[in-house]
Every structure is written in C-alpha cells, then in structure tokens.
C-alpha cells in the first residue's frame, strides 16, 4: 500500500537552521553576559528537542533552572526576529515537496520551534503554501516524541496514520512516528543527529529527499 500523506519535522529535516540557531543563541549568550560562544559543531548536539532543552543543554543546567529559563526566553525572543537569516532548505527538499504536492499527497509539518518562528520560516522560505497543516507545541500539544501533533495533523488532512509517513532527523521525530503508528518512519541523514542504533530496525534511512517518492508510488530521480 502506498502512503497518501507525509509529516515532516522542520529544523534539520526540511531546513538547515543550524546557522540561525547558532547566531541567535550566541547573541542571547552575549546579551546575558556569558563569556563563551558556540561554533557550528558545538551547537549541533544541542539541537532537536526545542528551545528550552537547547538552553539547558548549552548551559549544563536543569530545564527549570533560572539561568536556563533566562537564556530560553531571550533566545526565543531573538529567534522570532531572526528566524531565517541564513537557513535554507536542504538539497532536494523543495523539488520533492512540489512533486508530492502536485501528485495530491497531503503534507504537514510538526516542529519544536515556537509557533511564530515556525510560521515566519515557512513563509520566508516559501514552503508554507505546500502544507495542509503545521503545528508546534505552543499550539497546545505535547512535544515529540509524543505522537499528539502527528495525530492532529492526520485528522486535519483526513488521512489515517497508517497511510502517512513521518520524516525527521532526531530520536524525538522517529519515536513520534513509531508511536503514532505511521506507515513508514524515515530518518534523513543530512540532519543534526545520527540514526539511533536501537531504532535502526524500526525506521527507513535515506540520504536524499527524493528517495521518499517511491513510498508514494512515484519515480525516484535525484
């Protein structure tokens, strides 16, 4: 059975947001008086679980520590103003999304990114017209790996989860897809986290976005 819908993570899956995340967290760190800055390689391990988790990880503090919360709030304030100064879609993303859209495949996006920043990124990069729905935890849903946002998107799209694929680059994305009972859960290698060994037998690994097309009965061409 071919899939009829696809749900995508945003940062690290559709868009290389690492340059923007790095620039914005470094600006927040500087404004708050910290005496260190992060390189791209130092930023990468902190990405994938949302802004509050990123702040806690960067500082080595608890999620509810006052310093974590201060960095989290300043980072998100800056991010809303500079959501896509440097980030761009990964190779093959736009072509694949357009092909799927033209074939009548329903598309959605679920991300840990704050709602305002998510909307701005999708608008700036001209991706938003391709999606039926997009959600962030701020919209009232549990964060991934909970399947709640995926289930809500499937309801809006009118396609059951067993006919929907989930595409992401982190454990949070993959576990959400598995928990939702998706047709296929896909790990894309261009993202920010390697495929976890313990999930290798439960997901499909791809290296280029166009490799998604056969899942929908469409020809694959890079």
Image (cartoon, rainbow, N blue to C red):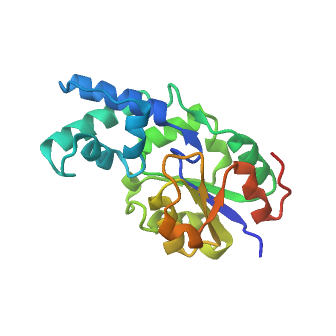
164 or 221: which is nearer to us?
Answer: 221
* Picture quarter with the N terminus: bottom right
Q: Is residue 83 left or right of residue 33?
A: right
Instruction: Report the residue at 70% width, 48% height from top.
Output: 208
Residue 204 percent location from the top left of the image: 64, 65
| Quarter of the image where one finds residue 25 | top left
Placement of 84 over or under 142, stated as above or below: above
> Farthest residue toward the front?
197
Q: Is residue 78 visible?
A: no
* Picture quarter with the C terminus: top right
Residue 30 percent location from the top left of the image: 25, 23
Instruction: Report the residue at 83% width, 54% height from top.
Output: 220
| Quarter of the image where one finds residue 2 | bottom right
Q: Is residue 213 left or right of residue 170?
A: right
22 or 122: which is nearer to us?
Answer: 22
Instruction: Report the residue at 55% width, 55% height from top.
Output: 168
Placement of 82 over or under 165, stated as above or below: above
Give the tally of numbered discs.
0
211 or 134: which is nearer to us?
Answer: 211
Residue 151 percent location from the top left of the image: 52, 69
Instruction: Report the residue at 49% width, 46% height from top.
Output: 192
| Quarter of the image where one finds residue 132 | bottom right
Q: Is residue 63 visible?
A: yes
Residue 11 percent location from the top left of the image: 51, 44
Q: Is residue 131 left or right of residue 54?
A: right
Placement of 97 over or under 121, stated as above or below: below
């Amino acid at each position: 059975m071919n899939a009829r819908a696809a749900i995508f993570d945003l940062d690290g899956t559709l868009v290389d947001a690492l340059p923007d995340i790095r620039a914005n967290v470094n600006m927040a760190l500087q404004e708050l008086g910290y005496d260190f800055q992060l390189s791209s390689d130092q930023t990468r391990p902190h990405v994938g679980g949302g802004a509050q988790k990123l702040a806690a990880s960067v500082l080595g503090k608890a999620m509810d520590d006052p310093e974590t919360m201060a960095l989290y709030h300043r980072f998100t304030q800056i991010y809303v103003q500079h959501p896509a100064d440097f980030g761009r879609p990964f190779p093959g993303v736009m072509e694949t999304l357009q092909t799927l859209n033209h074939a009548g495949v329903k598309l959605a996006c679920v991300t840990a990114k704050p709602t305002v920043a998510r909307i701005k990124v999708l608008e700036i990069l001209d991706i938003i017209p391709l999606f039926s729905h997009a959600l962030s935890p701020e919209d009232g849903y549990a964060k991934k790996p909970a399947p709640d946002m995926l289930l809500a998107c499937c309801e809006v799209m009118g396609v059951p989860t067993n006919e929907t694929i989930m595409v992401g680059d982190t454990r949070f994305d993959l576990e959400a897809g598995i928990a939702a009972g998706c047709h296929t859960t896909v790990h894309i290698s261009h993202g920010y986290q390697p495929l976890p060994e313990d999930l290798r037998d439960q997901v499909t690994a791809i290296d280029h976005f166009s490799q998604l097309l056969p899942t929908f009965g469409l020809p694959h061409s890079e």
